Image (cartoon, rainbow, N blue to C red):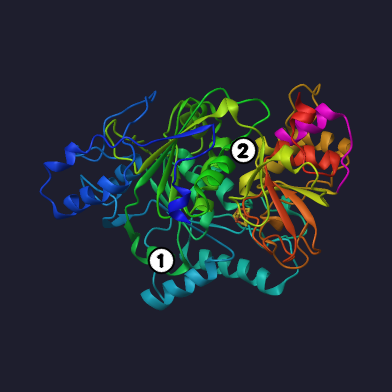
């Protein structure tokens, strides 16, 4: 499956450069591993051509002997090495460790077992604990998990714990944020050049900030809690160059569905996915987060976008921690490079039951749906709701199926109720959603993205067909095992809500 996924694409919108150049720099290196690497890359490396970037800075990991990618440089700095190559195992100092209500209790247990009942975490200011998954439920075990997080944070004097005590009214909890990956960004924990690990596979979202960010298991996280470091294998990098003007009916969700459809759910297994090109540079931080959020759906170890003025502007006022971005060298070695002309892409969906079952939205126009879900770390950010509102506003119609809205965080929820939608004469998203007949926006959390306890809002409790802005459509993901989930952008989700069928948003946006 993996090899066929990397075969040259038949898509007219993507080209994979297959020129084997730039390896001569390796030949002067006496290291055994480099020689082995050369043997490997002579078979597998397809391209080492680096596209132009707007902000190129020198490496900050010491003198450069062999060019490195962003990911290699971040890991080199974090492991206090001047040079790293893919495949090397290194002890990496961790800048931020995040865990949440689902994995926190297990992580704390492992930490205590291995480091002792009275052990202290390595740095109380580098641990971030965010209850977000199973929050608004009467399930005792789910509620208990949040209590365990609270007890641990009090015991360890953890600085960043985004607690929720009053489940009846999330607004009564000023510390409560919501979905961890969006909260991490909003609270300034995502910084260029740093290493962020989290007990959640979508921790890769933070790569949008030019950071090495990846999900780890509870055992590794328990170790990081005590030691502040982790042994990581340096991944090789796939580079995705996206150029061309983004049509105004596309969103980053379409771009990542295009890529996953191209390389398959195993096409980037244990590889870094670096996103560059004029289209990526034009994306907002929230859209870059959507792009990086789903790299794990292609098996990616991490996703990464070079930091630029958009990144720095987003970070203004969010963090006092000094950070330093790094960038891939011109001659950095990429395992493969893919090029996309974004101007030629069309709105996409991923059909049940895999994120790589890519199809054009218009090809699925006969698929009758039962509901629409707009939410999650992928598609529940402020811009996602603004995008959905834009479609409802343009149509002037009412939805034909139940349409559930779950803002990712408390801040997003407030934006939905306060930010005017462009071209609406000052109406907020919430007003437009109400006029369109959507359900009232729910309390911020992961909601039904992961199914959750039976009483979770908008959970798929029947074998229904749902168009969703989330990131996974495996059987049972949103609840019922026979439910069918079509992953889509907020534009496509809103358009589908208006017709009751999977719908290309151009039906309303043009
Ligand atoms: S919103 Fe969904 S994908 Fe994101 S962290 Fe929560 S459960 Fe995971």
What type of secondary structure mainly makes up the magenta span?
Answer: helix
> For residue 413, what is the image quadrant?
top right
User: Between residues 173 and 64, which one lies in front from this camera angle?
Assistant: 64
The residue carrying pointer 1 sits among few (fewer than 14), some (14 to 19) or many (20 or more) residues within 10 Å by Cα, namely some
The residue carrying pointer 2 sits among few (fewer than 14), some (14 to 19) or many (20 or more) residues within 10 Å by Cα, namely many
Disc on the earlier residue, 2 or 1: 1
Name the residue beneath numbered marker 1: 220
Q: Is residue 457 visible?
A: yes
- Relative to 501, is 33 above or below? below
Question: Any mark on residue 285, and which?
Answer: none
Disc 2 versus disc 1: nearer the observer: 2
- Relative to 103, is 405 above or below? above
| Range of residues picked out in magenta | 387-401
Q: Position of residue 337 (x, y in %)?
A: 40, 37
Q: Residue at x 28, y 48 (%)?
A: 43
Q: CA distance from mark 2 to mark 1?
A: 33 Å
> For residue 238, what is the image quadrant?
top left
Q: Quadrant location of the C terminus?
A: top right
Q: Position of residue 54 (x, y in %)?
A: 39, 23
- Relative to 224, is 407 above or below? above
* Magenta-colored stretch includes residue 392: yes
* Magenta-colored stretch includes residue 47: no
> For residue 325, what is the image quadrant?
top left
Contact check, label 2 and label 1, Cβ < 8 Å: no
Name the residue beneath numbered marker 2: 254
- Viewed as shown, does residue 81 lie left or right of 93? left
Helix, strand or loop under label 2: helix
Q: Residue at x 78, y 65 (%)?
A: 455
- Viewed as shown, does residue 68 lie left or right of 458? left
Q: Position of residue 124 (x, y in %)?
A: 43, 58
């Amino acid at each position: 499956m993996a090899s066929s996924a990397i075969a040259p694409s038949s898509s007219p919108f993507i080209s994979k450069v297959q020129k084997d150049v730039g390896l001569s720099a390796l030949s002067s290196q006496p290291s055994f591993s480099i020689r082995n690497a050369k043997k490997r890359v002579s078979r597998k490396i397809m391209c080492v051509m680096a596209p132009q970037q707007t902000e190129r800075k020198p490496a900050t990991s010491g003198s450069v002997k062999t060019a490195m990618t962003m990911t290699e440089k971040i890991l080199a700095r974090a492991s206090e090495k001047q040079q790293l190559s893919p495949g090397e195992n290194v002890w990496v100092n961790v800048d931020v460790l995040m865990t949440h209500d689902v994995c926190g209790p297990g992580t704390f247990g492992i930490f205590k077992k291995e480091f002792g009942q009275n052990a202290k975490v390595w740095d109380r200011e580098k641990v971030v604990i965010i209850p977000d998954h199973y929050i608004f439920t009467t399930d005792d075990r789910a509620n208990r998990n949040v209590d365990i997080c609270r007890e641990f944070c009090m015991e360890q004097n953890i600085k960043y714990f985004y607690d929720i005590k009053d489940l009846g009214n999330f607004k009564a909890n000023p510390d409560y944020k919501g979905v961890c990956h969006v909260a991490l960004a909003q609270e300034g924990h995502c910084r260029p050049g740093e290493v962020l690990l989290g007990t959640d596979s979508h921790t890769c979202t933070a790569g949008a900030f030019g950071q090495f960010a990846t999900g780890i298991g509870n055992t590794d996280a328990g170790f990081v809690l005590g030691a502040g470091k982790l042994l990581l294998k340096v991944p090789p990098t796939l580079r995705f160059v996206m150029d061309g003007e983004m049509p105004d009916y596309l969103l980053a969700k379409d771009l990542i569905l295009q890529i996953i459809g191209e390389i398959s759910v195993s096409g980037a297994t244990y590889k870094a996915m670096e996103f560059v090109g004029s289209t990526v540079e034009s994306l907002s931080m929230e859209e870059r987060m959507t792009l990086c959020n789903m790299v794990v759906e292609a098996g990616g170890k991490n996703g990464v976008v070079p930091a630029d003025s958009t990144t720095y502007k987003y970070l203004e006022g969010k963090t006092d921690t000094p950070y330093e971005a790094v960038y891939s060298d011109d001659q950095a070695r990429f395992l493969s490079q893919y090029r996309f002309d974004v101007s030629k892409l069309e709105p996409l969906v991923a059909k049940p039951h895999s994120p790589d079952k890519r199809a054009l939205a218009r090809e699925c126009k006969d698929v009758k749906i039962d509901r629409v879900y707009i939410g999650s770390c992928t598609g529940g950010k402020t811009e996602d709701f603004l995008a959905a509102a834009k479609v409802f506003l343009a149509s002037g119609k009412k939805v034909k199926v139940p349409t559930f809205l779950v803002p990712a965080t408390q801040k997003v929820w407030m934006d939905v109720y306060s930010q005017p939608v462009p071209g609406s004469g000052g109406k907020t998203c919430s007003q437009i959603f109400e006029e369109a007949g959507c359900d009232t926006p729910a309390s911020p959390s992961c909601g039904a993205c992961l199914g959750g306890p039976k009483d979770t809002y908008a959970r798929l409790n029947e074998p229904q067909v749902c168009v969703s802005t989330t990131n996974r459509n495996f059987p049972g993901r949103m609840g019922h095992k026979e439910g069918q989930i079509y992953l889509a952008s907020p534009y496509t989700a809103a358009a589908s809500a208006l017709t009751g069928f999977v719908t290309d948003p151009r039906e309303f946006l043009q």
